[in-house]
Image (cartoon, helix red, strand yellow):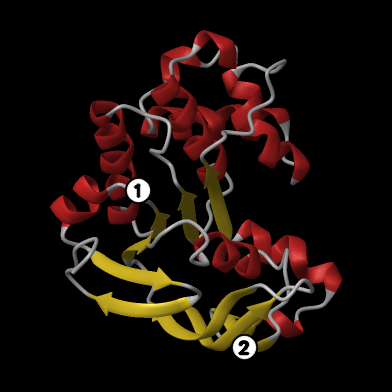
Amino acid sequence: MIKFDKVSKKFKQGTVALDQISFAIDKGEFVFLVGPSGAGKTTILRLLLKELEPSSGSIKIDGEDVTKLKKRNIPVLRRKIGTVFQDFKLLLDRTVEENVGLGLEILGKSDKEIKAETKEVLKLVGLEQKADLFPVQLSGGEFQRIVIARALVVKPDILFADEPTGNLDLDTSWQIVNLLKKINKKGTTVVVSTHNVEIVDALNQRVLRLEKGKIVSDKKKGKYKK
């Protein structure tokens, strides 16, 4: 489903974010992407979304070379990838339901479709009773669940969570990770960029570790540092 082949990314000021990395992620996999800050984890996400262009190498999603994608087709690519950010990026003047339904609104769905599909995804993340609240009325964990719901409502093939537990306590972090596992079991490919050693070590999933722009280990049932 996702294939990086000898991908490098060098910025104009000379910083090398990625250096000849190659890996593949199959449909339905759950993968942790780990490594110190600046290792290249967020650069991988930005390349997948075609927010950045690689300096060299190829990136394929479902066999299609993202690097050769025409500008008019980028929105279609981005609908395949749901993104969950650490800083939430919710609209504070919209209700939970309105925040989650925004992607469907952009896609031109009818009000009836938006209502039904938003209700379905809010139920999945356990927040169907919070639909009429505003983000300021939510806890940090609820905030993150709403961000996940917003990413899921357009039914992406891939969910990329960038430090989804970074600002949460341990109990809430586990709730979010268990939700991501639940989503994965329904068939969505899930990639989680994280520094949370305890969660990575406990789940025994595939772990891709980056250091200084290189992949230094790739283990099917890996640990954070081993």
Specify whether residue 133 is in view.
no
Q: In the image, is residue 124 above or below residue 152?
A: above
Q: Residue at x 27, y 32 (%)?
A: 175
Instruction: Answer with the quarter of the image where residue 166 lies.
Output: top left
Q: Is residue 64 above or below residue 194?
A: below
Q: How crowded is mark 2: few (under 14 residues within 10 Å), some or many (20 or more)?
A: some
User: Quick one: which residue is furthest to the right in this view?
Assistant: 72
In primary-sequence order, the first of circles 1 and 2 is: 2
Q: Is residue 24 or residue 168 the one in the foreground?
A: 168
Identity of the residue drawn at 23% across and 64% down: 225
Amino acid type, callout 2: Ser
Secondary structure of the residue carrying numbered label 1: helix
Image quadrant of residue 73? bottom right
Q: Mark 1 or mark 2, which is nearer to you?
A: 2
Q: Quadrant of the C terminus?
A: bottom left
Question: For residue 146, which numbered disc appears in the image?
Answer: none
Q: Residues within 10 Å of mark 1 (few under 14, many from 20)?
A: many
Q: Element type at marker 2?
A: strand
Residue assigned mark 2:
58
Give how far across and how far down residue 117 sits, in percent: 54, 35
Hey, which residue is sitting farthest front in the picture?
14
Q: Name the residue under label 1.
A: 183
Q: The residue under label 1 is which amino acid type?
A: Ile
Is residue 28 left or right of 4 when viewed as pictured?
Answer: left
Q: Nearer the viewer, residue 112 or 6?
A: 6
Q: Which residue is drawn at 42% across and 83% down?
A: 23
Image location (x, y in percent) of residue 26: 37, 76
